Image (spheres, grey):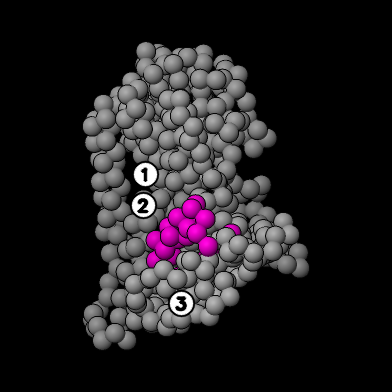
Amino acid sequence: MFDIVIIGSGPGGYTAAIRAAQLGFKTAIVEKYSNLGGTCTNVGCIPSKALLDSSENYHSVKTRFAVQGIEVGALKLNFQQMFLRKSEVVKQNVSGINYLMKKNKIEVIYGTASFVTNNELSVKAADGSANSVKSKYFIVATGSKPSSIPGVEIDKNRIITSTEALSLSAKPDSIVIIGGGVIGVEMASIYARIGVKVTIIEYADSLIPTMDKELGKELQKVLTKTGITVLVNQKVQAAKNNGESVTVKYLDTANAEKEISAEYCLVAVGRKPYTAGLGLENTKIELDPKGRIKTDTRLRTAEGNIYAIGDVIEGVMLAHKAEEEGVLAVEVIHGEKPHINYNLIPGVVYTWPEVASVGYTEEQLKEKGIAYNKGKFPFSASGRARASGDTEGFSKVLTDPKYGEVLGVHIIGARAADIIAQAVVAMEFEVTDSALGKISYAHPTYSETLKDAYLMASGSGALNI
């Protein structure tokens, strides 16, 4: 009998397991695949970032080095080596998770878990054998899987998801990507940088539609310069595998039918919670209309001893959101009273320049009728950005006119993914825009764009170049 059993070993799952072990619980983690780490480590966050860095390095050498006086001669892309490196990075991360499980004395059980009762799982191993696993508490952290749209059937051959796109055996000539969200634009960046003809077809009127509109507009300009064709306000109707190519049919803004063919069609229209085969029907656990497990604010399901976290419940599907929820669930079981401010969970897009955001978007503030001041400072006016040649983008802050409280921060620019952490701290501890404009920032740094945006929002003028 265990104290806590976690189903799923992604970032939410393994973080929950480690925290549980730290608090003295007898802990086990159940994983249906042969490697720990879930989607993020194996076919998501980690491999995509490895390829994003490799492809950006190649693209920089090809397009930016000459002006810096660096002559590299004949440039050659070794596609197989690039993807082999990606696999090695994944392997290292999986090894790290395995080490943490052993270090914290967490029992790892491989197999597919299904609830028999609210206190017992049946875990079916790869060889077909089944074992009973009993526990006082369970945490469901089974994550999500790619979803599609009517008329588009994913065959994992020519009509693929990001999973297959991260493991192609040869460089394709062309790819059509359905969806201009985070996954779509990141995959587009990887392939466009290495010379693949990429077209993004997005239903909304801008890229990354869940983020601040100005970020999406700026990103579209950047991607277009890279050679990516971006089609917004388009409605995909169907995708057909022709054997060696795919034809995608869509309606344009005038509702006229158009079509485009490419070697592959990558479907990046979002993800859906993975609950199939969990045996939830043998418990009191309920699903909402979107197939997500219903929980209360403490992440408890209708079964008081079963919790759920991450992509399988309501909220943004982000690895770090799952991690925070994993810790919260375990600490609630331990009798503590932790809290997550979901408005302060940052979102990041790892294109180059990077995109990062936290808090309210400008559109949300307008919709809610909340007054705000706006400070916006371009990277083109940053000495550090000029020195590195990374002058695209801006830092934008939205603050309360009366008290100076920071309501939202939105950045597109070099190292935005790292800079956004300062904004999260500032919002968590309610530091005002004027105070954030007065503290010392190292010069020259990209973060100074944020300082000047704070100064502008507070009513002061920008100070840096």
Q: In the rendered image, which residue does mark 2 sit on?
A: 47
Image point 26% across, 41% down: which residue?
A: 96
Instruction: Name the residue rendered at 56%, 56% in the picture.
Output: 359
Q: Residues within 10 Å of mark 2 (few under 14, many from 20)?
A: many
Sequence-wise, the earlier of marks 1 and 2 is 1
Look at the image and give the residue range highlighted in magenta: 407-432
Name the amino acid type tagged 1: Asn
The answer for how far apart the CA atoms under marks 1 and 2 are is 7 Å
Find out whether residue 418 is within the magenta segment.
yes
Q: Which residue is mark 1?
A: 42
The x, y position of residue 411, in whole percent, is: 50, 66
Kind of residue at disc 2: Pro
CA–CA distance in space, label 1 to label 3: 34 Å
Kindly indicate the quadrant of the structure image that contains residue 237: bottom right
Q: Residue at x 52, y 69 (%)?
A: 434
SS label for mark 2? helix
Q: Secondary structure at mark 3?
A: helix
Q: Position of residue 424 (x, y in %)?
A: 47, 55
